[in-house]
Structure formats: structure tokens, C-alpha cells
Image (cartoon, rainbow, N blue to C red):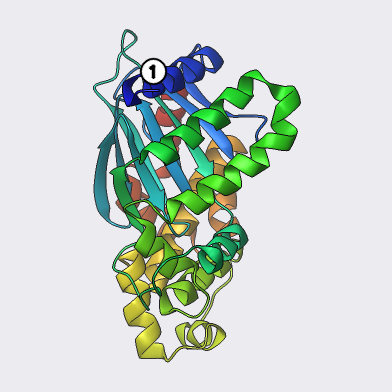
Amino acid sequence: MKPSALLSECAEIIAEKMPREGSMATEIVGLNLYRRETDETIECDSGQIMVAFIAQGCKETLMTGKRFVYEQGQCLLSGVAAPASFHAVQADKAHPFLSMSLRLDVQTLVDCASQAPLPPPQNVVNGCVFVFDGTDELCDAFLRLLRLLREPNQAAFLAPLIIREIHYRLFFSPAGGALRSLASVNTQSHAVLRAVSWMKQHYAQAFKVNEMAEMVHMSVSAFHRQFKAVTGMSPLQFQKQIRLFEAQRMMLNAQANVSSAAYAVGYESPTQFIREYRRQFGRPPLRDIRQRQGQIA
């Protein structure tokens, strides 16, 4: 199958499953579909280790303080669970943006990294987000996974096999070297990944950087340096972003009010929370949530 035909079939399946604008978690665990018909809708996510693939259109993502633009046939790989905001570019009803994302499993990545016939990993990488053209083999695996949405009786057995294949094939993509560093247990990049995973699970809990460095068996100076090299932020800045994105999710999806969301994510002062929320998202919480809910409606 030619790449253009492959992309067309991917887009066809996504459009079939997503006849209206929105996002959808599929019956295949970790696989999500997206359809956007305007440039205005901005979605936010508190972060996950994932790979996204665009079947049709173009997308802009803000992550780790950087702007990434990628389009049809390209992938975005996030090697750590970094908060992100994103929107489609030049999408309309006649030419909707259509894409998929797959959540990646850390232990599967570690297993594949140890088994793949590749050179030894770098000790640390600069950055954790990578945009690249999907290889033919990787795109084919994405398509086979999407096809299983039409064959639910086969998906229970075959989807885990294809998902593991995707994990493996990512190591042979243009982002493979960086991913190998993040997924190899004896590297400083992997130590940062472990620290981020802990912060994602305990975002409301205060921590001291020296304790975090000790937890991942690094000196404080090395931990600071490598954490910023991988994520683009200091550990405390990264935690602040996780808290703000999680609070936004609570207010959008759980109807939490401003104060309860602030306290739930670890803020001691709603006033400080409102100030930092506005700095992050450009609007105070109530106005931001009302506008986003209006966009969704």
C-alpha cells in the first residue's frame, strides 16, 4: 500500500468513528481519536508518555516551553509525561483535522529497549518531545491498530500485540536514539523519567529537590541539570505546570470550583493559584473554564 493510500485509510477510519468534532477514547485501551473542524478549539492535557500520528491536517502543540507544528504523516513523541496544550491548524468542516494518539507504557518501553539490537544509549538527551516523519513500518502498524476498531472481536487478542510492536518500532524511528536513552534503566535520562512519573502521581505533595535527587540516585546539581535538559524546566516549575493543568481538568470535567481545585492540587492560597493560573493560561480560572466549556458546547 502506498503511503498516500495508507494515510487515506487511516483518515477514513477515524472519520468513520468520529463523525462529529471532538475526542474519543476507544475500546482499545490507550488509543484515542481526534477530529477538529476549526482552529479555535484548544485542548490541554496534564501529560502522558505517548505518540500521536496525524492522518489528515496539521496541529500545533505547546509542550516543555516549546512550540511543535506537525502535519499529515508525521508523529509527535512525548518521552515523559509533560503537560501540553494543542490545537488544529487550518481545519474546517470540508477538511477536518484527523489524528490518533497512543499512550505508551514505561515497562514495555524498558523491555523493548533492552531487547532491540541498537547501539548503547546516550546517558542524557536534550529534550523529551520529538516530531518526525512516520516510518513506513510504524505507519503500517498504526493502520493495523485502527483497523481493529472495525473488528472488535479480534481486537482483544491482536491489539496488545500491535501496541507492543509500535513500542518496539519507535526505537527505529528518527526519535529512537532519544527514546532509548529515556527507556534504558542505567541512564540519567531514565532517572529524570522516573522523577517525572513520581511527580505525576504525587503532584499535590510538596517535595525537596535534594530528596528527589536522592530518590533517583543523582547529586542535586546533576539532577537539576539533567532534569532541565530533558524537560526544559526546573523540577519545581514542572510540578507547578502539572498542578495547574490538573486543576484545569478538575474544573472542566469534575465541576470543581476554583478554591477546591486549588487546594486539591496542593496550593495553600487560592489567590496564588489564580495568579499563577492566569499566567499559564492567559485568563483567570472562571473565565478560562467558561470559555472552554463554550467552545466544547
**Of residues 75 and 211, the one drawn nearer to the viewer in this rendering:** 75
Q: Where residue 54 sits: x, y (%)?
A: 37, 31
Q: Where is mark 1, residue-wise?
A: 8
**Of residues 119 and 81, the one drawn nearer to the viewer in this rendering:** 119
**Of residues 157 and 284, the one drawn nearer to the viewer in this rendering:** 157
Q: Where residue 278 sits: x, y (%)?
A: 34, 49
Pointer 1 local density, CA inside 10 Å: few below 14, some 14–19, many at least 20: some
Q: Quadrant of the N terminus?
A: top left
Is there any visible trace of residue 47 in the rendered image? no
| Residue at x-position 59% and y-position 40% | 162
Is there any visible trace of residue 82 in the rendered image? yes
Question: Is residue 87 positioned above or below 109 on the image?
Answer: above
| Residue at x-position 44% and y-position 51% | 170
| Residue at x-position 32% and y-position 7% | 94
Q: Where residue 279 sits: x, y (%)?
A: 30, 53
Q: How many numbered discs, if any?
A: 1
Question: Is residue 189 positioned above or below 292 on the image?
Answer: below
Residue at the top extreme, as displayed? 94
| Location of residue 266 (image quadrant) | bottom right
| Location of residue 219 (image quadrant) | bottom left
Q: Amino acid at mark 1?
A: Ser
